[in-house]
Image (spheres, rainbow, N blue to C red):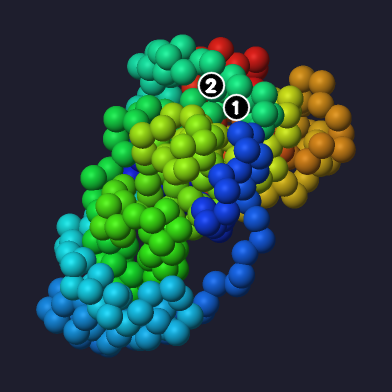
Amino acid sequence: MKNKLTLLSAALILAACSTEQPPAPAGESVAQTVAPQPKMPEFDPSAAPVSQVGFNGNDNVRRFVESEAQNGRYSRNELQTFFNGAVYKSNIISIMNRPGTSRPWYEFQKSNAGSAKISDGRNFYMRHRQVLEQISREYGVPAEVIAAVIGIETNYGRNMGSFRLADSLSTLAFDYPRRAGFFQKELHEMLLMAKEENQDPFWFAGSYAGAMGLPQFMPSSYRKWAVDYDRDGRRDIWGSVPDAAASVANYLKAHGWKTGGRMVVPVLLTPSPQIQAVIDEKTELKHTVGELRAMGVEIQTPIADHERAILYRLEVSPGLYEYYIGLNNFYAVWQYNHSRMYVTAVRDIANGIGADNL
């Protein structure tokens, strides 16, 4: 995992498989072992800014070109031509530099998993039910979860973003020092993706942060987990619901989704410093259900003590919290977007569409 939530999600999503090989059979995971990525050149913040000297006049771009020409599949001339065509987007830097705001769950839920989103999700599910359920059977990920991810990422394809990745990733790679290394790697991935997909690198479009298509994959995620499910020779996550849905399922399966497992379970507890310390921990499956029970967490749903979980809370109205544990499949979705509220919203949409109590 782009935002309305889409903007935030695109930036967070974590988002290499060569299409020179035959397309993977329907339902087959495409995640494969790939050669190590070349190390990106050290970013020099003192270099003359691209906003003043252009991309090819910037020292960081020159070092990137040299590195890519030595280690990649582009010549220096091809790369210089690419940067001559890339357009610097100052508005992207303005968006990235806006102070972040943290909304409480009761506001977040209303805009990202409310009744309109669920209603649209049911319509999306019914329109594509046959292929969604087929993908679900093959990957073991509920069709409703796949639809929910697409819904929360792009409002079922309505908001996929219109920035050329050549412009957005080049701007962020060379004029956003705080995350220059990350965006240089994604630019590297996008250039390889263009070669592998036999596409003009200026064709790809997505969010201001470089996330693409119905599932809002970053280029690195696209290369690793995108699937040509409809077997037309192209992993089209922009226009093909089968490809996009299978790509989401493939991502979640690769990140640990277990068929039939729960995502979220409400719990009861009496707040205490120990409980709050656990809630404040990093999101990882650090504790077992048995350990949480021993701390006084009342889990009324039958769950084995050996299952691993996180404990978290959501503000359901001003100053009022409800408490939950997130299980293995919670953590699989969290890999898509590092937000507890995001994962809970995916669960709520999926249940609203018709999933069996995730």
Q: Nearer the viewer, residue 317 or 231?
A: 231
Q: Label 2: how many residues lie within 10 Å, few (<14), some (14-19) or many (20+)?
A: some
Image coords of residue 258 (percent x, y): 73, 34
Image coords of residue 306 (percent x, y): 87, 38
Q: Nearer the viewer, residue 88 or 78?
A: 78
Image coords of residue 182 (percent x, y): 44, 67
Residue labelled with disc 1:
135
Residue pictured at 46% horizontal, 18% vertical: 128
Q: Is residue 356 above or below residue 333?
A: above
Q: Nearer the viewer, residue 335 or 113?
A: 335
Q: Quadrant of residue 310?
A: top right
Asked whether residue 351 appears in the rendered view, the answer is: no
Image coords of residue 140 (percent x, y): 69, 29
Amino acid at circle 2: Val
Amino acid at circle 1: Ile
Residue labelled with disc 2:
131
- Left or right of 158, for residue 251: right
Q: CA distance from mark 2 to mark 1?
A: 6 Å
Residue pictured at 48% horizontal, 50% vertical: 222
- Label 2, secondary structure: give it: helix
Is the Cβ of the residue at disc 2 closer than 8 Å to that at disc 1? Answer: yes
Q: Is residue 250 above or below residue 181?
A: above
- Label 1, secondary structure: give it: helix
- Left or right of 203, for residue 296: right
Quadrant the C terminus occupies: top right
Q: Residue furthest left?
A: 52
Q: Quadrant of residue 88?
A: bottom left
Q: Nearer the viewer, residue 45 or 260?
A: 260
- Left or right of 23, for residue 70: left
